[in-house]
Image (cartoon, helix red, strand yellow):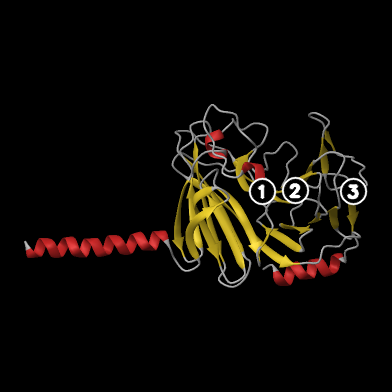
Amino acid sequence: MRDALRVLFVAGIVSTFFTGVCAQMPGAYTTSYFGYDDCIILENETVRAVLTEHGGRILEYSLKGNNAIYLDPAQEGWIYEPGEQTVDPTGGRLDIGPEATIPPHPDLWFGRWTGHITGPRAARLVSVEDEATGVQLIRDFALDEHSSHLRVTQTIKNISDSEKHWAHWSRTFGTGGGIVFIPISTESRFPDHYIMYGPGPVMNFRPDDPNIRIRDGFIEVLNTPERPKLGMDSMVGWFAYAEKNDLLWVKRYPTYPDRPYKEMAGLTISIWYYKDQMTELEPIGPRENIAPGKSASFTEDWWLLPYEFPGDNKVDLDALELLVETQAR
């Protein structure tokens, strides 16, 4: 009897220990946020990332309390119910594509994910197994101990019995009215290094928009373009977004010049610039050939840097590039 009690006592200690590890680690804990219970917080002294299981999104990515991510206040606490009217959720979204040919997948886009803390300033969100696409998505987040560097990795796991050919598609919303900076590739297929979508299904490869400027090796989206959706094929592997709240959001990601990209225009980046409300910052991955039971992953590395917003649109692009190369590595 005494041995049995000892076993139960030790098992209880072990169970409590591992439950605590899962529930809280240095710089990682759960709390309520934006109307959602059990959000996961990853933070260091100056930076915080807030994750929600609802849609597997990032609700906050902030430097000294200054959030770079756009959230619609009207969506606070909104929960997806199958069969009911949906909204287009705001926040730091991720997805898979290609946009025009992938089947609808509301359980991945809107649905409830499972989240847990995986280590100091690290967490994982896991989707349901989605029959429509034949995959399950896993999103891993890791915040640096000292800097604003947030590593975001999405893994596509094939749960079907046939090969799948989806691609990573980032769809994060920054706050509106900022300036997008994209270093251009000399080998671009587009005469002006970008295309503009619309009207309708048209993809205009000769747009003429006063709010989009090609200068000193960069595309600059300075303000609301004639049509909101833009596409680029740059292989440089980073772009930046200057927000009006004096933040520079830098995204780095791998590019693969020798692999096919499945968006219709072979895009590596899309920007959706909607008035002064929000700007969608979209690195796009190459086509993945995922055999049954196998997985493919794509990683984005994010930084937030203090950056005084240039209200006159006059930016020293050499200085901006130097800032990114020295502070966002």
Q: Residue 195 at x, y = what percent?
A: 82, 41
The local secondary structure at tag 3 comes to loop
Query: What residue is rendered at 84% in x and 53% in y?
Result: 219
Q: Residue 276 at x, y = what percent?
A: 80, 47
- Alpha carbons under labels 2 and 3: distance apart: 14 Å
> Mark 1 highlights which residue?
71
- Specify the amino acid type for callout 1: Leu
Query: What residue is rendered at 68% in x and 32% in y?
Result: 100
Q: Residue 119 at x, y = what percent?
A: 45, 64
Which of disc 1 and disc 3 is earlier in sequence?
1
Using the rendered view, name the quadrant where residue 6 is placed.
bottom left
Q: Above or below — where is 150 with respect to 295? A: below
Asked if the residues shown at circle 2 and circle 3 are in contact, with their CB atoms under 8 angstroms apart, the answer is no
Query: What residue is rendered at 38% in x and 63% in y?
Result: 21
- In this rendered view, identify the residue nearer to me: 47 or 106: 47
How busy is the neighbourhood of tag 2: few (under 14 within 10 Å), some, or many (20 plus)? many
How busy is the neighbourhood of tag 1: few (under 14 within 10 Å), some, or many (20 plus)? many
The local secondary structure at tag 1 comes to loop
Q: Which disc is residue 183 wearing?
A: none
- Specify the amino acid type for callout 3: Asn
